[in-house]
Amino acid sequence: MLEEVGELIVTTLWMAIGITGIFLLYVAIAASCAFVAKLILQGRKKEEGFNSLKTVTFGDESSVSANRLASVLGVIAIFLLWGIATGSKFAPPILPGPHQGVATFEYTAVNAAGQSDTGTVFVHTHEEGDTPTLTEIGAADGFAVDDVVQVKVRRSKLLKAQNNDEGGKEDGFRVTHINSQPIEADQTVDYDGGSLKMTKKGSLSIAPYPGMTMEALYLPPPEQVWSTFLDLNANGYQNVGLWENVFWSLSRVVIGFALGALFGIPLGFAMGLNGWLRGWFDPLVEFMRPVPPLALIPLIIIWFGIWEQGKISLLFLASLWIMTIAARAGVSGVNISKVHAAYSLGASKSQLLRKVILPNSLPEIFTGARVAMGVCWGTVVAAELVAAEKGAGKMIIAASKFQLTDIVIVGIIIIGIIGYGIDILMRKAENRLIPWKGKG
Amino acid sequence: MSGLIIDDISMTFQLPGGGSVEALKNINLDIKEGELMSVLGPSGCGKTTLLNILAGFLAPTSGHSRLGEDVVTGPHPARGMVFQKGALFEWMSVSDNIGFGPKMKGTPQAEIDKIVEELLDIVGLQEFSKKMIYELSGGMQQRVALARCLANEPDVVLMDEPLGALDALTREKMQALVLKLWKETGKTIILITHSVEEALLLGERLLVMAPRPGRVHKEYRLPFAEIGAGADLREVKKHPDFGPKRDEILNMIWDMEEEIMGRKEG
Ligand SMILES: Nc1ncnc2c1ncn2[C@@H]1O[C@H](COP(=O)(O)OP(=O)(O)OP(=O)(O)O)[C@@H](O)[C@H]1O
Ligand SMILES: [Mg+2]
């Protein structure tokens, strides 16, 4: 136990260091871009409007608006870093890529009789799926016969050079030098395309230089993700179209959220207006609120199975409490003067509810709806990861089983963009429907 | 229509800590129909509490009030209220706010439109009928609040510092408007204010209240409202009696405030 905690602390510290490194790198890029942008934009027309006349801006949140140029550059920087890290064709080749093509080295072998001879090894390093035209080996001038080896990029290959040599199977036959450098078991020697290590049994483990860029298995370059996207867009994955997957995820979210709002808002109003109902539901709501929807997945699967009913129930539960609490907050946020005024003007209870309490709580309800939509979107993807026929999450998890990282990344990007899009739409709707928000 | 009678009202708030505050003690008042009464008093003397009881938002611990024969038990359109601020409905346009009362009663829309138009005219907001509340200045908003209250044709208009949040100039215009409305509609108006000048200008009858327990300290009958209804308010302030009355009441309130402070420090 204590040991594990110790490990945890060490891991955390390492992570902190790693995060700091990445963060500093990104901030440094941001800062240098800011510097360059400032130099370029100097002398251009200053920003206009009221904010430009404020002398106190640092600390005045309202005078800080997001710099759109910075947003664009920030996104470009991410793509650029991504491209550099993965050796993209469209990024400057700052990090060396893995070795590809033909490299040769000579080995010196001693046969059982004690004679020595040299042979050449041609190492063909190629991308997965490529079939390189291999070097033709000419006739040998001694007992050591040349070898041809094919290695995939970033992989290694075991070569027993003596296998095709004359007398190579005899005792005492062994490889002694690589490119005139002596080598023994467990020693590593570089050749011009990478390094090789001699195993205990005298074989050569050839490892072409892997480069410093990331392998597509871990992170494919942007262009590969783009072409995967085009392919998915046209052909889908596992017989389900990309947008069909997205459509199913979205439908679940919309239906689950709508159900949650349909029941949550009246429940919240009831709790805000009636002491018995508030008392009745308070423990339930307060208990369910902190339970993350994901923790309910096992139960939901047991109860409703893995089909639509289960997922929609889950999303219903995810949004129900949020909407309930938002509606309740909306009711309690009504300025008491408004209620008094409405009654004094002759409003009945139901008129008060419809004409005053409902519109007055719309801002709170909208805020709740934005949160609920975000939570639902996250929950649906997670639920689909566990079990689904179709859906964005299902596509990701299916692709991950075959290590199709590019599809996973396409999925993640689409999920992010749609989540962002939902929030933007909700905010637009909010501005249109409740222009009085924050102005009461 | 008939007068508003306050019959031996007392109000004691139980504090959560266990103590209690006597916000009002044995208030007896007889407010005639069409009377314009202003109420003055140091902070915490129970003015708002009294008005809330008259509006029917609070039930007194003892005593009762009635409008004519109708005992006050809750809010009623016959007793309209103009709040200091925050009581307009931001989600409605100016016209919809003003027409709210008639609409609740089920008045036909054509009739509501007529009432609204008339009131917009009276408070001088004809051009703003379609505007939203948050697009108006504070003074305009108070004019809407006044119009909304009047649209319901209440017998009594209760105002709790309706002009307290306005600047001096707007305030003066609004005072003239209140006087004009009072004269033209003949409504009973009770107006709470912190400004002695305002109380003098807008009170045929002026009530000075004293705190702990909240009670009526002194009453005045004043000629200024009657004069001001037909003349420039600034002229009224030059009336030979105006200055002395103002100083007298100011001193009275000052003494009360000092007493409170003294008691607190002691
Ligand atoms: N809901 C309440 N609970 C407890 N005490 C209250 C409550 N409302 C008012 N009081 C107390 O009653 C007294 C009178 O309050 P009230 O608001 O009527 O004063 P006021 O004359 O309107 O003051 P101000 O001029 O500051 O508006 C105060 O001492 C106040 O603390
Ligand atoms: Mg008050």
Image (cartoon, grey):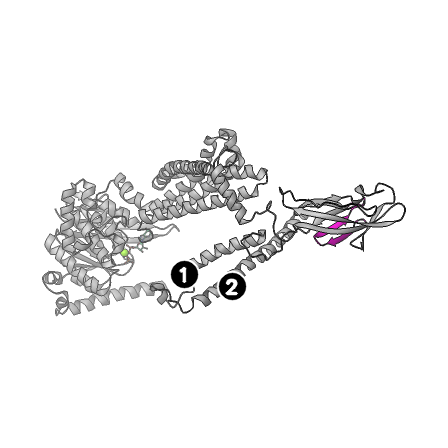
**Helix, strand, or loop for circle 2?**
helix
Q: Is residue B108 above or below residue B145?
A: above
Q: Say whether residue A361 is left or right of residue A241.
A: left
Classify the position of the N terminus of chain A by image quarter: top right
Which residue: 59% across, 46% down? A216
Q: Which mark is residue A64?
A: 1
Residue A263, given in percent of the width and then of the height, sits at 38, 36
Callout 2 amino acid? Ser
* Residue A282 shows in this picture: no
Q: Are marks 1 and 2 in contact (CB under 8 Å)?
A: no
What mark, if any, has residue A32 been given in the picture? Answer: 2
In the image, is residue A190 part of the stretch drawn in magenta? yes
For this rendering, which residue is in front, A256 or B241? A256
A437 and A26: which one is in front? A26
Q: Residue at x 53, y 55 (%)?
A: A80
- Provide residue B17's location: percent of width, then percent of height: 39, 51
Of the residues shown, which amino acid type is indicated by label 1?
A: Val
What is the magenta range?
A185-203
Secondary structure beneath disc 1? loop
* Residue at (19, 67) in percent of width and height: B246
Q: In the image, which is nearer the foreground, mark 1 or mark 2?
A: 2
Mark 2 within 8 Å of ligand 1, using the beta carbon = no
